[in-house]
Amino acid sequence: MTSSFLIHRMRQDCLKIILLAIGFCYLLERSAYALNPNEILVIVNSQMVGSEDLARYYMKKRKIPNDRLLSISVSTNEVISREEYQNSILLPIRKGVKKARKPGKVHCLVLFYGIPLKIAPATSPQGQEQSEKAAESQQAAVDSEIALVLMDSYPLEGWLENPYFLGFQNRKTFLQKDKVLMVSRLDGPDTKTVYRIIDDTLSAEKKGLHGKGYFDARWPLPKEKHLSGYALYDADIHQAAQQVKTRMPTVLDEREELFGPGECDHAALYCGWYSLGHYIDSFTWSLGAIGYHIASAECTTLKDTSSQVWCLKMLEKGVVATIGPVYEPNVQGFPLPDIFFGNLVAGYMSLGECYLVSLPYLSWQMVLVGDPMYQPFKPGEHAKPGEAQPF
C-alpha cells in the first residue's frame, strides 16, 4: 500500500465515507444501497446434516427466492485439497452462478454450515520438487478463492488486489469488478449457533444495534504521516473508534495491555489486537454484536470447540459476525478497521459490502462469518453520540 493512499485514507471523514459508499453501490449497478435478496446465491453441502435446513430457514427469513439455493457434494472436513476444491466446489458453483445469473445478476455467495473452510498447501506432482514456501503460497480460504469463481484462470501464488477495496480505486488491478463476487458464510461449531446468528441478526436489525464500541489499540496515535504494517493498523483502530463514537459510547484503549477479563460490558462493536489464537473473555456481547481480532490464526477452525481462536469463541459467546484468517495473512491482509466500521455506522452498506470495500486482497486467507445482508444502522438515524473515551 502506498504512502499517499495511507495518508488519504486515514484523513477521510464521515462525509467521504458516505460518498464512497454511494459510489460503490453504483459500481455494483444497483439502484438500492443495500444488498438485495435476489442478488444472493446460497450454497449448501448435501453431505452435511442440517446444512440445507439452515439455508432454507435463512432464505425464508430473508425472502431469498427458492431457486437461489445450490446444493453441492463435498467433504465435510474443514480442510480440503486444491484438487477437491476445484472439482467439488469451484466447478459446480461456477455452473450454478452462471445458471442463476440468467434471470438476474448474482453479486453475493453465502456459504452454509458444512462447506469446507480452507484449501491446504499445494502438493507437487510425483517426481517434481516444490519448495515449502511455494506450496504455502497457494493455500487459501475457500471463501476468498470462490469470490473469483467467474475468473477462468488467475495466479494462485500469493494474493491478488481486490478491485473493490477503496484504497485501490485509483489504480489498475489484475482483477476486474465484474469478475469478483461478495462472499460470506453462515457457519459455526454447530447448527444451534448458526440458527442463533440468523435470529439475533434479524432481531438486532429490527431493534437497532445498541451497546458500546470497544477498540483495543496498543499505542497512542502517532504523529508520523507515513505508516505501514502494525503501526498503520494500530492507528487505524484509533480512526475506527472516532467513526464509531458518532453512533454509540466508545472506549479506546491505547495501553500495551489488552482488555482484561470482564472489562467490556455491552460490547456491540469491537476491534483489537494481538492475542494469537487465545481469546480473552473480556466481553459481554450485545444482541447483534460484530467484531474481529487482528491476529494470524483466528479462523483456523470454526468446528473444534477445544480451540481458543477468536472467531470460534466470539461466535460461541454471542456475536453475529466476525472476520479472521485461515492461514497467515500478514497484517495487511486484514480489512482496514476504519473503512469497515466507518461504512458500517454510516448505514448505507450491508455487512457484506462493508467487508468487501475494506478488504485489500483476494485469493488469500480472510473469511467473513455473518449474514451479508445485515444492516444494523440506518443512514441519518444517529443514536446519541458517545465519546471516544480513553481506557
Image (spheres, helix red, strand yellow):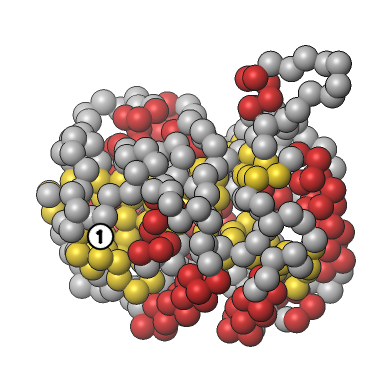
Residue drawn at x 18%, y 35% as measured from the top left: 256
Name above or below for residue 391 compared with residue 274.
below
Q: Amino acid at mark 1?
A: Phe
Task: Kindly state the secondary structure of the residue where label 1 is placed.
Answer: strand
Q: Is residue 264 left or right of residue 186?
A: left
Is 359 or 279 nearer to us in this picture?
A: 279
- Residue at 79% over, 23% down: 124
Whether residue 32 is visible here, answered yes or no, is: yes
On screen, residue 147 versus residue 387, left or right, reads right
> What residue is shown with label 1?
283
- Total residue callouts: 1
Q: Position of residue 331 (x, y in %)?
A: 44, 33
> In the rendered view, would you say 65 is above or below 222?
below
Side (left or right) of 3 relative to 238: right
Query: Residue 291 location in percent, x, y?
Result: 38, 56
Residue found at x 35% / y 30%: 230
Displayed quadrant of residue 347:
bottom left
Q: Point out residue 199 in the picture as x, y percentages from the top left corner.
A: 47, 80
